[in-house]
Image (cartoon, coloured by chain):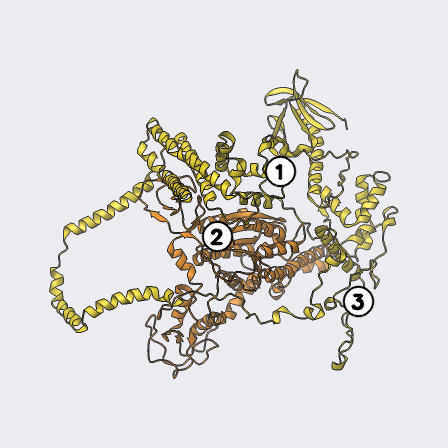
Chain colours: A orange, B yellow
Amino acid sequence: MPPRRDDSDSDISIDIGEGSGKKGKGKDKAGDKRKKDKGKGKATEAAYTWEASYTRSWDTVQEDEAGSLQGAVEDWMARGRRRRLLAPAAPVRRTIIRHLVLLLDLSASMLDRDMRPTRFDLTLQYAREFIVEWFDQNPLGQIGIVGMRAGIGERVGEMSGNPQDVLKSIADRHKLEPMGEPSLQNSIELAKGSMNHLPTHSSREILIIFGSLTTCDPHNIHDTLDACVSSKIRISVVALAAEMKICRELCDKTGGQFGVAMNEGHYKDLLFELIPPPAQRALTRAAGVGATNPAADLMMMGFPTRLPDASPPSLCVCHSELRSEGFLCPRCMAKVCDVPTDCDICDLMVVSSPHLARSYHHLFPVKPYTAVMSMEDASASTGCHGCAKAFPTTTLAAASEGMSPVGRYRCPECLGEFCSDCDLFIHDVLHTCAGCGR
Amino acid sequence: MPTTIARAVLYKKLSGVLELNETHLQWAQDGKSAPSVRVPHSDVNALFSSKEGAAQVRLKVALAGDDTGHNFAFTSPKAQTEREKFKSELTLIVSRNRTAAEAAARAPPAKPAPVARVSSTPQRPLISQAPSRAVSVSSADQRNVIIIPGNDPATDIRLRKTILMSDPDLGALHRELVAVSGQLSEAEFWEGREHLLISLAASENQQKGKAGQMVDPRPETVDGETKIVMTPQLIHDIFDEYPVVARAHRENVPGQLSESEFWTRYFKSKLYHAHRASIRSTAVQHVVSDDPILDKYLEKIDDELEPRRQRNECVELFVDLGATLEDHTETGNEKDVTMIAGRQRGALPLIRKFNEHSERLLNSALGDLPGAKRQKLSADGSYGQIDIDDLHDAEASTGIVLEMQDRQRYFEGGISQSTSSAETTLKAMDIKTLLRHAKAHMQNWETNLAQLKIERKPSDTALGSMTHNVASRLEVQARKNDIPDALFRQMTICQSAANEFLRQFWSSMYPPAAEVQVVATATPAQRAAKAAKMIGYLAKTQEKVDALVFMGPQHNIDPKRIEIAMKPVINAVNRAITFHQSKTSSSRT
């Protein structure tokens, strides 16, 4: 600001007092900010965070020689493909009936703007997407939501198997306004309290989204950790700031995953990695009574009778309201409004077969397709086995690892060759090979 | 301050005298001697008053556990000043109650924070906390069944009460079945609902942890004057953080200095600047003045190479900055001189202050632990310390391999069925004939198409049925619940009672895998008895529903509708009864 500099030149004595006062204040603020941003160091790179993310978008997408973005997109997809190859090929036991408590950090540190628009807004947005996707992939699961705010845990949403109910509980942004300091211990205890009554065949999971670098606990948090280990609660943490020893330990000891989000995209990746059901661990429960039980057990489920939409209204057991549509529990004939659910009367798990089928694909993942590396290797077919799109006839020069230069991906079972779009669609959406049906 | 103030006020539109004495706030109607409102000081929780210049001069006192509180209206011409008198006295009491409550909530209980006001009066003895609220409900003593183990009956009852109050439906059900008709015992009612209690207990038992920030009073500048607003909380924090200030306060207030003088001097003294959580010390020399009283408490600045308070714990080698020994002489490493603790002397006191602060904070959270437990020594010695997790291969998956019998059939089930049917049809027809047929069909397709006429009747019926379907759906949606409230409530009460019996019945039939430690798990005989009892109640449901149906015409409701509405309940009840019959007859034979 030129005028001010003029001032200071002309009238030094006054300006020193004022200037030093201001400087002190500025320093304070910068200090605060640095404290919060510790481990990110982004504040130092660019004056404003929006500038930082603006430059970032150019980093990820680069045109190839011909000026097309195709190569970049392919490269992006190849990354996912490589990750899939890392997954164990043999099917493992997974928990199909899941219970998850989402622990949202609602402390003041969530108001940081290092993720746009703020950590808080981004978290809410991702949490909504996460919940929708989670229920899509785990229709038999239930989610509860707990907020960490002002030193205590707050129950935001009760455990529910209905995505609408869960979404409604975090729909109102103003009720969740961040404030105060978070307490990991209090909120984990609270989450634990709402899962203690669950049967053992279901999983108990806590997913913590943690933006703060401190936790403000009344007692020894390691006791809480031990309690979680003994009640088989799996804790995963997505940290938005930096790695904290206690967070890492929570995840390691309970068998969860830990990750620090580097940017918005990575944040979402970390979160969505937790959607597929976790594998059951073999050795960790050595302390369990009567050793771990390797044999699988059957559990009882009921397939309800659906009442038509146009049937005359009658009272349901869950809301005591007059409704026409509903499902009849096969064991006790009670009328419930929604499936899947535990019957309100006889506690039988009431599901419909599509729910089961949708959960099963995690047990039988489609084998990763291998990339065909050269034209000599390719089969005679000229079009994709899935969508019949013609394969490119030229070989792409710059192909990164896991990416086929001829644009063909082969199923190891039926040897059908697919284009990269179909590969993605089959693995991410369809979950069954279009060629051989497995 | 007078020990007692009394003024004429209106309470619930009755005139009387409001009196504030040493222990209670009380109100007695004119002409009566015994006060009809009597509130101990410790119960006063909050204070509200009408705005200055409002038509009525009101004062509202909210009580602990009862937010509605009491409302007093001052009527005399000097109402404003009278109210102010009460207000100022009660404000003191309220603030003291809050501090006490906060102090009680924090473990270990801190000593009561003194009031920091200039006008502060000699400390009155703290009145003990309000009597436990559970006393009011202890009339239900014969139902004192503890549901959650490890809880005392009083809190257990209070938790149950809170749940019933927060969920009106559940409350109504409880009233209906347990309190009024006594069809279920308290324990039976809560069986299967333990999780409600546990989760409520979990959310109620939370304590706030102590925040990690160091006390740093922020001066505010108003009209050129620098002010620090002292709250009881702040004073408490300062005393906690710097015991020496507490000592100075104890020894000098109110003898040599008044409360406000003490704090004014403190914030100007060297003592305060030695306590600040930063090294902003350069400019300070001008502000700080010598203080004969407080300077006595100054301690020597802790910036020697060795800290004043020696730590007797052994530091792990991996984090010890001093451990830069020559330990691998064969590879030729030398003693590291780049990292020396306390090279910048000015930073030393600050570092040590932080250390002490952190230690104090941890101690307040952990309580007193034996020294051995305090340090989490890694079990696998110094080798384990340099074994960094990130360098391990993450591949080692420990998942249990899914073994499925006849795995092949899972995949082939769908396929084989469809292919076999397709194959049989294919076999039946030869491809050549098929082609020939198709060709024959395709001849003259243009003329055929032109001659095509769609029959009117089938399409009409198809459309008609579709419209009918949509209409009936629409009708269901449009139809409002026009059953009168009273009747509807009776229906829901009847239904929820029946549901509760059903729930009890099924839970005695199929007891849930008990993960939660319930006080007593029922024996099979007990369960059978309970099931029989529930069936007894359930058998009466039909009568009740019939009565409701009978009431329909009185409310101008088609009895059919009530019958249909209650149909699922009746079905479920009948199902339970038949189930029970078959169970008992099979067990007898």
Tag 3, which secondary structure? loop
Q: Where is residue A430 in the image (x, y as percent from the top left)?
A: 39, 64
Q: Position of residue B193 (x, y in %)?
A: 52, 42
Mark 1 surroundings within 10 Å by alpha-carbon count, few (fewer than 14), some (14 through 19), many (20 or more):
some
Residue B343 is labelled as 3
Q: Which of marks 1 and 3 is nearer the N terminus?
A: 1
Alpha carbon of mark 2 to alpha carbon of mark 1: how far? 32 Å
Q: Nearer the viewer, mark 1 or mark 3?
A: 1
Q: Kindly indicate whether the residues beneath marks 1 and 3 are on one polypeptide chain.
A: yes
Q: Chain for mark 3?
A: B
Amino acid at pointer 1: Pro
Q: Mark 1 points at which residue?
A: B153
Residue B50 is labelled as none
- At a point 38% along the width and 56% down the height, the residue shown is A354
Q: Which of marks 3 and 2 is in front?
A: 2
Looking at the image, residue B172 sits to the left or right of residue A12; the answer is left
Seen from the viewer's position, the closer of residues B395 and B424 is: B424
Amino acid at pointer 3: Arg
Q: Mark 2 points at which residue?
A: A142
Looking at the image, residue B152 sits to the left or right of residue A392; the answer is right
B546 up-or-down from A172: above or below:
above
Mark 3 surroundings within 10 Å by alpha-carbon count, few (fewer than 14), some (14 through 19), many (20 or more):
few
